[in-house]
Amino acid sequence: MEFSSEANQRIARISAHLYPPNLQNSCLRQAKCRAKGGAAGFKVAILGAAGGIGQPLAMLMKINPLVSVLHLYDVVNTPGVTADISHMDTGAVVRGFLGQPQLENALTGMDLVIIPAGVPRKPGMTRDDLFNINAGIVRTLCEGIAKCCPNATVNLISNPVNSTVPIAAEVFKKAGTYDPKKLLGVTMLDVVRANTFVAEVLGLDPRDVDVPVVGGHAGVTILPLLSQVKPPCSFTQEETEYLTNRIQNGGTEVVEAKAGAGSATLSMAYAAVKFADACLRGLRGDAGVVECAFVASQVTELPFFASKVRLGRQGAEEIFQLGPLNEYESGLFCLLHLCFQDWLGESEERVSWKHSKGHLLQQEMKRCQEKFHRLSFFSLESPSPVISKP
Ligand SMILES: NC(=O)C1=CN([C@@H]2O[C@H](COP(=O)(O)OP(=O)(O)OC[C@H]3O[C@@H](n4cnc5c(N)ncnc54)[C@H](O)[C@@H]3O)[C@@H](O)[C@H]2O)C=CC1
Ligand SMILES: O=C([O-])CC(=O)C(=O)O
């Protein structure tokens, strides 16, 4: 149903604020929900909205003018977070959903679903250590998406992204709803960090810097392409190694600084909103929206790979080639490739097999490090990165 008059629109907006939401009868259930001023807006759900990432992410999405309806779902604390955020005088209507029985209502009719649900790392852990618990959480949430909003674009944040994205793909395949263009692993924080650290070295404003970061989202699978930085620039070998190491271990740097209180939340919420905004602009039909994301890909032999993608009405409509790599990046790519082999199997079983055989991967890495001894400071995901600024 389209809102034909301003009065209808106001009534719809007021009724949408009533709690608990009655989605069956609400006219806001319709796809053409409109934001203040009559502009079309998108319906966005955040799953894990009461968490360290979820709360600032919800706050920032409430400010986004492209969002008309914001659904906040978690297994704890959503009434409080929702009441709090709903008082912000911005356009989006906010509704809270608590616990599994409300998951379907949270998801019905959504255009974009952002998933930061799951446990974060503590010092000494790798992202892979989160696999067992987070894989189960992501699986359940994706089953809900397949049922209630099969056409939604999904931004998957929960770690280990290198494995949760293939798992989500399996769930959607099983449900017959898989659209590889609409399943996007969020690696934007790697780009945000790379822009910041490179700007620091070059003495530039980070907003003027663009660093493509490709591969995956853990340790050596994070490959910043420093030879393709915009504006064009060059680095000494020492700067290159410092920057690569710091970008690859940025997550660990925060985990250790937080000393047991979790991993990156505020910078991640910022990065997630930057990425979600790009997805929404793409959905709106804006031209030339390009960001890095971890997607099903034919750019390399690996079935999933992060690279620059063009975001459009259908999701990741175009996946760009990596472009020319210099010798150093080619060596890193070789390491990354070894690390990913088998890891990103086509099936969930293979992903969990790889997880349980993580020690074999470590041995493989060691062999590779010996081969590329110039790169020997890399570890799969170093719990204690040595960061020495040139
Ligand atoms: N992709 C990336 O670049 C990054 C990913 N992460 C990952 O994001 C995830 C979340 O991190 P934080 O927000 O710091 O953790 P957190 O523990 O503060 O919040 C997670 C939230 O998920 C909720 N949750 C747990 N099970 C759920 C379920 N079945 N359904 C809905 N919600 C559920 C929890 O109740 C909690 O509110 C972690 O896996 C972390 O490793 C963190 C930083 C960067
Ligand atoms: O390091 C972690 O566990 C969280 C994360 O993915 C990041 O900050 O890049």
Image (cartoon, rainbow, N blue to C red):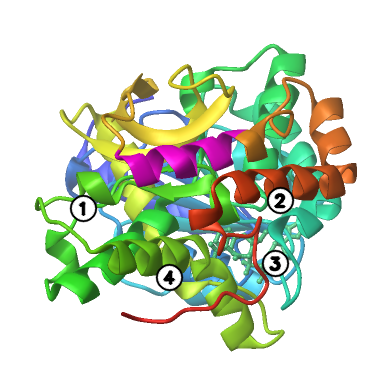
> Badge 4: how crowded within 10 Å, few (<14), some, or many (20+)?
some
* Disc 4 residue lies near ligand 2 with CB under 8 A: yes
SS assignment at label 4: helix
Residue contact at pointers 3 and 1, CB within 8 angstroms: no
Residue 244 in view (yes/no): yes
Q: Position of residue 169 (x, y in %)?
A: 66, 25
How far apart in space, not on screen, are marks 3 and 4 (Cα)?
A: 14 Å
Disc 3 versus disc 1: nearer the observer = 1
Q: Is residue 199 left or right of residue 204?
A: right
Residue contact at pointers 4 and 1, CB within 8 angstroms: no
Q: Position of residue 234 (x, y in %)?
A: 15, 57
How far apart in space, not on screen, are marks 3 and 2 (Cα)?
A: 27 Å
Residue 111 in view (yes/no): no
Q: Nearer the viewer, residue 308 or 91?
A: 308
Mark sitting earlier along the chain (3/2)? 3
Q: Is residue 332 magenta?
A: yes
> Badge 3: how crowded within 10 Å, few (<14), some, or many (20+)?
many
Provide the residue designation for mark 4: 267
Provide the residue designation for mark 3: 120
> Badge 1: how crowded within 10 Å, few (<14), some, or many (20+)?
many
Provide the residue designation for mark 1: 210
Disc 2 versus disc 4: nearer the observer = 2
Disc 1 versus disc 2: nearer the observer = 2
Which range of residues does the magenta coloring cover?
326-337
The overriding secondary structure of the stretch rendered in magenta is: helix
Task: Count how many numbered circles sit on residues in the image.
Answer: 4
The dot on residue 366 is 2
* Disc 2 residue lies near ligand 2 with CB under 8 A: no
